[in-house]
Each structure stands twice: as C-alpha cells, then as structure tokens.
Amino acid sequence: MLALCVLGCSTLLGTANATAASPNSDLFQVEQQKKTVKGVVTDDTGEPIPGVSVLVKGTTIGQITNFDGQYVLDVPADNDTIVFSFVGLKTLEEVVGNRTEINVMLESDAVDVDEVVVTALGIRRDKKTLTYASQQVSGEELLKSKDINFMNSLSGKTAGLEIRKSSSGAGGSTRTVLRGSRSVSGLTEPLYVIDGIPMVNHKGGQPGMWGGTDQGDGLSQINPEDIESINILKGANAAVLYGSQGANGVVIITTKKAKEGRVDVTFSSSAVFESIMAAPELQFDYGSEAGAKESWSYTKGNYDSDYVDDFFQTGHNLVNNLSINGGNNRTSVYFSYGNTSSSGIVPNNDYQKHNVMFKQSTKLFNDKVRVSSNVMLVSEKTDNRNTAGYYLNPLTGLYLFPRDKDFQSYKDNYEVFNTDRNMYLQNWFVEDHFQSNPYWVINKEPKTDLSKRLIASATLEYFITDKLKFQARGNVDYAVKSYEQQHAAGSNPTNVSANGRWQYQKYEDKSVYTDGIFTYQNDFGAFSLDATLGASYQETVLGDGIAVDNGTNDLLYPNEFFFQNLPFNVQVRSIYAGKVIKQGVFGNFQLGFKEMLFLDLSGRNDWASTLAGTGNDSYFYPAIGLTGIVSEMVTLPDFISFGKVRASSTTVANEVPFNKINPQHSINSGGGVDRNTQQPFRTLKPEMQTSIELGTDWRFFNGRFGFDFTYYHVDSKDQFIPLPAPSGSGYTTYFINAGKIVNKGVELTVNTIPVKTRNFTWNSTFNYSKNNSEVEELVPEFEDKRIDLGSSEGYSTYLLAGGSFYDLYGYKFQRNEQGQIILDEKTGKPQKTTEREYLGNLEPEWSLGWNNSMRYKNVSLSFLINAKVGGKVVSQTESMLDGYGVSKRTGDARDNGGVVAINAIQGTTPVTEIDAKTYYTTIGDRNGILEAYVYDRTNVRLSQLALTYDFDMTKLSLPLKAASVSLVGQNLFFIYKDAPYDPELAMNTGLGSQSLDNFNLPSTRTYGFNLKITF
C-alpha cells in the first residue's frame, strides 16, 4: 500500500526516476501518450467565462474554467475531442489534433434565459433579472443587410422601434422613435451610447417642400463592423440612470474588443449594387400644346420614353474592413480599419468614409487595476447628396419635361455659351421658378458634405475587493463639419443670383463626458445585492461655427466662391446651436431573493444649465421595478422551461431646449440690432414623463418556443407651448408649460425554433408592436389652440386636444349629404373644402417584423419580412405629376376618351364623367385637393436576404481559421403596397414633413456579395 502511494504520489507530483518509470515501462508510455491542452473560454463579447465545463468527450476527465476563463487539461491520445458547455450557451466541440492551445468563444442560445446583456452605464446584468423591456441584436445580425447606417439594419428586428430611412442616400440621417412621438419641442429620439458613454448625434439641415438637403447625422459615421452588439433599452424605466438624455430610451452600442490568448486577423469585403425599386409611373404618349410647359395634349404621339430611366444609374457600395486583435492575460489590443466607397443612383452622387478604431486593455497590480482606452477616427465625405422638394432638384425638371420636346438635346447641351456674358449658362426650355435642367443641377451646382470626427475614451477600473469595484471614465467626442454648395451663374434665378450663389457653413460639435462609479456585488445567504453609485459631468457644444449664403444677392464676380467675393450686404454669420452643461448623481440597487425575486430601485438628480435662472435647474426622478421568476417560485409543468413577470414605474424629465429662458437680441447684416420678440421664459420647468411598464417572459419546450410581452403607458406633461403674446407686451410670442400627451401600447416578441436536427436548424422571431397616441390636453384656456408640426402646400400636421400626434389635415372634396362631389356651376371644377380637415394619422396602427435564420451544415439562409399596417402617407409628387399631365393615370384617362369617372353633382345635375384635364389640373398641381393624394401606409416587404456558405477549414490546406462567402440583399421587393412610392422613405427626419413625398429620390434595392476570412 505504501509503495503504491509513493508511486502514485510521485507520478502526480511529477517526480520520476529510472526505477519508477524506465523508458520501457508501461507508465512511461502512458505519460508520453497524454497531451496537455490549455486555453481561454470567452463569450461573444470577449469576456472570459468562469465555470465552463471542459470535458474530454466520452470520459469523466475534465475541469471547469477559473475566474479568468482559463483551463488546463490532460487529453488522452485515444480520445482527441474536447467538449465545452455552459448553461445558456451553445455547446462546442473541438478536435485537438496537434494543438496545445485551444481558445474558444461560446455563443448564446437563441432563447437563452441566462443571457447577460449590457444595460445603462455599461453595466452587465443577467437579462432574467431585469424589471424593464430590453432587446439585444448581435453585430453579426446587423451585418447581414450591409447598410452604411447601422440603425437602418435594426428595422423589424426589435419590437417598438420605429425607423424611417432618409431618401437622401448614403450618409443620410435616420429618424428613430421608441414607443411613439410625444414631445412638441423637439425630436423624440433615443440617446445613443457607445461602450457606456453618450455620443453626439447632431442632425444637420433637413430638406423641406422648397428644397434643401439632408446634412446627415452622427450615426452613419459608426463602422458597423466594429459593433459587437446593440441593446435597446426601450423606455425611461430602463434608461433613468442616464437622466433626461435617456427619457426617450437608449440605444447601447457595445464595440468589439480583443480576445485574450490568441491573435486573429479578419478581413471582409463586400460589393453591393443599388437599383430603383419604386418610382413614379409616368406617361410618354401625350405632349404639350402651343408651347405650354404642361403635357396636356389630347393627340397621341411617338415620344422618347427612355430618358427618365437613362438619367438614373446603377449605384454601388464597396466596403472593406480589416481587424486585428490579440493579446495575453495582461494586455489585449483591437485595431480595425474600414473603407466605404459608394456611388448613388443619381450621377455625381458619391460617398467616401474611412474608419479607424484602436482599443486596448491592460491589467496591472496583480489584476487589481484595469486600464482601457478606445479611439475612433472617422473621415466622411459626400458629394452631391440627393435633395428633395421643389427647388433646385433635378427630379422636377426630369419628371415634368414636356413629352413632345427633345430631352436629349437638353441633356447633351445642358449649358450653352452666352456671348453677352462670355460664359456658359443653363440651357432649358422654360424659365420656371422650380424647374431646372437636371444635368445642369448635378454638374453646375455641386455640393459637398465633409465631416471629420474623433471619439476617444479612457477607463480606469480598480477592483478594491472581489465584491467592490470603482470605475472612472472620460470621453471626448469632437467633430468638424462643413457643408458647401456652389451654384454657377445661370442657375434658376428664383434661388440664385445672376453671378451665382455660395452656400457655406463650417461648425464644430463637441462633447466632454466623465463619470465615476462604484459597483458592489455580494450574496447574503438567500439574498443578493447589486449596487451602483456614481456621478457624471457632461458639457456639450453643438453647431459652433460660421455660415454664409448670398442667396439672390449678386456675387462681386461670377462663379468665384470665396469670402472676399461676397457682396457687402451679405453677412458672414456666427452660428451656434447651443451649449449645455449637465451634472448628475445617480444610484441603482437591485436586491435579489433566492434568485427568484428581484427589486430594482434607481434614482438620479440632474442639474441642467438650460434651466439656470428658473429655480428649476435641479430635478430628481426615481424608478422602481419588481421581477418575479415564476418558474423558480412554483413547480410548473415540464413543458414550461421558464416564466417571469415584471413591473416598473418611473418619472423622468425630457431634455430642455437651449436658449428658451432668456433669448437675446441679434446683429443684422447692416450692423443694426434685431430686437428679440420672444418673452423670456423664466418659469420654465422640464417636460416630465411618467412611465408605467408591465411585462412577462415565458419559454417552453426547453427553449423551442418563447415570448416576451410588454404593456406600457407614458404620460408626457408640461410641454413647451408657444402662444401669441398679449397686445402691448412688447413681444410677439411667449411660452408656457402645459399639455399632456399619452402614449400607450404593447410590444410582443415571439422566439421559436420550429426545426432542430443534427444538421438543420431553423430559428424564427416575430416582433410586433402597437402604439396609440392621444393628445389629452394642450392649453386649457385656449380650447381651439393647435400646434403646427409641419405644413406645406395643402399638407399640415397639427396637434389638437383630443387628437393624436401626427394627425394629418388637408383640403378635401366638397360633398353633399349623399356623398357626391360638388362641381362649380360655371366651370365644372371639383370644389374643395374651405378649411383643412382631418385626413387620418401618419403613424402605422401596428408593425411586424418576421426574422428567420436557417442553417444546414455549412450553409445558412436568413431573411426578414417587415410589415407596417395602417396609417396614411401623402405624395405631393403625384399631385404635381397629375397637374402637369405627365402621370400614367392622366395618360390612361386620355386613352379612355379623355374623361374620368366621377360621382358628382353640378347644381342639381348629377355628373358621372368629367374632362380629364379639368379634373387633374384642379385636384393636382400645387395646393389642389390633398384628399386625392393621401394613401394607405400599409406595406409588406422582403427587407433582408442573406445566403452564406462557411468553408470547412479542416478540409482545406490553407492558413486560415475561418472563411465564408455570402449573397446579400436589402429592400428587395414589396409583397404588398398601396402608395405609389415607398411609404417608409423619409423626405425629412426632423419633426415636420413626416410621411410626405415631395420629389423624393425613388427607393432602391441593394444586392451583392460579401467575403470574410479570418487568419
């Protein structure tokens, strides 16, 4: 017994001698046949996972990973496979082969109840303990669509998230709303956060009915390839720790970082092409009469029908990205470079973007201190970003051009030499206030958007004990942006002087943020405590720069676009969008009982500079939530895997606009003073939102089926409402805090795995949301008070007590009690109402996204179907096309005898037919009868499609770790659509002009391929 013990202990301790283990002994041969394998196990965010089971397949030989996710395992020669498993993560098998180090990443299951998510301030929490709704989307899921702006890729993948993509093309801005619009004073958009720190998302200029260009936002500058995951915190209950910035929800972006213990080099390249999916239907059979600019001839001709299609080109997006990451157990580094090159469907519309990211993390002092930093550099340039609206838009002249004239001659000779002025001037068939030669606009009125941005942050983490940590962070977000458009002499004289026009602006956006946070985690028997205490300081300066626009004031010399060539009566203006300083202290305490009951208490106090001088500059808001894990409390049937109920409530202030309290006088171009006519608002209070949220989460059949349901109710009070000032007060406008807007609705996410076999898996997710908005009160003493959110010719969106946000108003047909359209007794023209009347609401009644992912061995297929049901949209484009006689419907009417069927009455005479020109020139053109151009917003489309093949690298003699090739497509086709244009394409991503089409660029589909390899 003693000899056996000595021999066994000597072997285990590694002490061997010639007597105990000679080269010919069986023991020596067994030792030689073992192989020691080590490595690190991480999750899909790169964090090490302690407690992972690492087991030699088919044996009891194994261990669990330590706190740093590390393991060391002796693998017998006769069994060469290691199995890695952990609750809530996908089990992974690795064949050892000749390797001595195997680092693995375990992915989350599709319906995992133990999923860890990133919440407010970058805090990681078990999703099952959350008392509010959140939804996470992986970076891999974002990349399936290959959209330049990553937010557009989220459409349909999260419940309750409303996204409208700009019609301006690559680099354009995006409108994002969570749980409905509710603020009169500004955009109801969420806060965007990168790695726990708020980022600036300042929107530039936006187009309107009279033209203009979307100058983009900050979101398009983020490289989607750098995103590890995005977590949507949908309500103020979830985002209260960010204060008033997070009142409308938070989009938390977690970027990729290095994996310890290995070096990976990944290169991806995609080529995506773009073509028109939905464009106006036009007629090319009928031209003009007697030199008119409208095409209202009733004589059919054989005219060119290709010039509109020929104007557009096939666009392309080329995206290349290289990332390198690696490190050891002390220091890890992640570096990436991305290059995006895009050409739109309109000639000369180009987009270039360069992204550089460097991220590092270092452990010091026996892992007690961790220092990390992140630097993101972006250079973005857009040439001739697409415009919208009537003026200086190539589409107006392109669509409205009389069909009997020779468009090719104006294309080939868009400029002609003028001997009187000794220069080239625009060649067009008519001088009209909103028509220009399309080729003159794109060649002689170029515009450039340029943005250079730095986002840099540093974090110090000090692990005081294994329970208590202190973290300090600092961040600078700095951007320099410029916009310039040079209108050559000879451009449309309505907008441009005879010597040309120069529009130029250059400004800076800057935000400095710092915080200090203590976190504490401990268990006390049956109880657990997660606590967070901290303070933050943020200073933001937006739009600080200069601007100039000579308009129709002549430049001193033609086509010289410099400051010294400006006329003396044109002012070089200082511009300033505002400075805000915000300080806050916050805390969050989550108390758990037996991992089945969790109480969440949060609170924050803010001090805001925008309220200085009112006495209301300090304000506190609390949040409380309770979660119960039903499946841990009671015994449920075997088919129920997990059950949870939750409730939460919070009160939070919405952001206060800059310069509402004490507006100042300004200096005009002549050196005089323009007196401020707005009464100071020294009693201003922040708009307050009270939110209640109830939810439940259930999983069945071992995770094969599950759903997450949320009901919410949000009251928004104390809106900033303008009113006409009393006569004799010396002011024209004053503000009050009043009004109450209520949004309530439901969100439902259903996760299913319909099929799961050894070789084939199908994951399917449904995201459903429905929001109801009601303006319960505006200004009690002014019952008929209405707030205009946006108006143009015949189109208005008003807020009225008893109505909803984005109610649409416009002129309707005058009808008698029998519903017949009333015609003028003399002219026979349809009559319109004297006032604008209610025509519906612009928001959808409900939305649905159906996301699917199928995998068979090395082949995977994913597709997304999006549906918006209900709501209204408006097309002023169609109205103008009808008025000018160039729409397909006006051509069809002339094909059918030149009349339109109608149920009308003229005097006392019923009328069933009306002359086509009379009808369409009355209801169409400008300021016609809007009712005829209001369409159902309902549409169903195939939003995304991706087919991927992953190469089996074990069968290829290549120095690669992984390789895949994908065919990708986005916005491929409509399954159903009522409107004559894409109703989800936004002309304007601001507060007004929603769901309005005014010579917007046609919507497009994209299709192409992607290659990704890892060394």
Image (cartoon, rainbow, N blue to C red):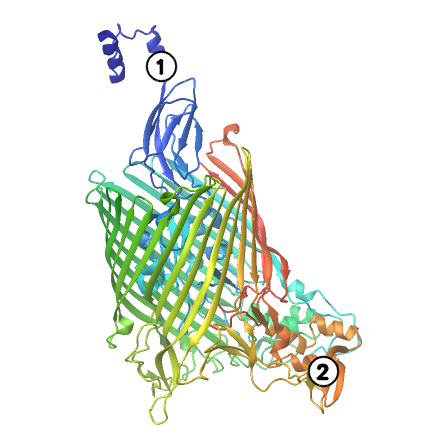
Q: Nearer the viewer, residue 351 or 196?
A: 196
- Is residue 114 left or right of 935 when viewed as pictured? left
Q: Residues within 10 Å of mark 1 (few under 14, many from 20)?
A: few
Q: Nearer the viewer, residue 720 or 322?
A: 720
- Is residue 1002 left or right of 625 when viewed as pictured? right
Q: Identify the residue at the far bottom of this view.
A: 728
x, y percent for residue 25: 33, 6
- Is residue 658 left or right of 382 when viewed as pictured? left
Quarter of the image with the C terminus is top left
x, y percent for residue 215: 46, 67
The kind of residue tagged 2 is: Ala
Residue occupying the point 33% across, 77% down = 660
x, y percent for residue 59: 40, 22
The kind of residue tagged 1 is: Gln
Q: Whole-Å distance between the Cαs marked 1 and 2?
A: 99 Å
The residue identified by callout 2 is 904
- Is residue 10 left or right of 637 when viewed as pictured? left
Where on the picture, by quarter, is residue 481? bottom left
* Disc nearest the viewer among 1 and 2: 2
Quarter of the image with the N terminus is top left
x, y percent for residue 856: 56, 37
Q: Judge whether 694 appears above or below 31 on screen.
A: below
Query: Callout 1: helix, strand or loop?
Result: helix
Q: Nearer the viewer, residue 53 or 302?
A: 53
Query: Callout 2: helix, strand or loop?
Result: strand
Residue 32, numbered label: 1
Residue occupying the point 36% across, 22% down = 61
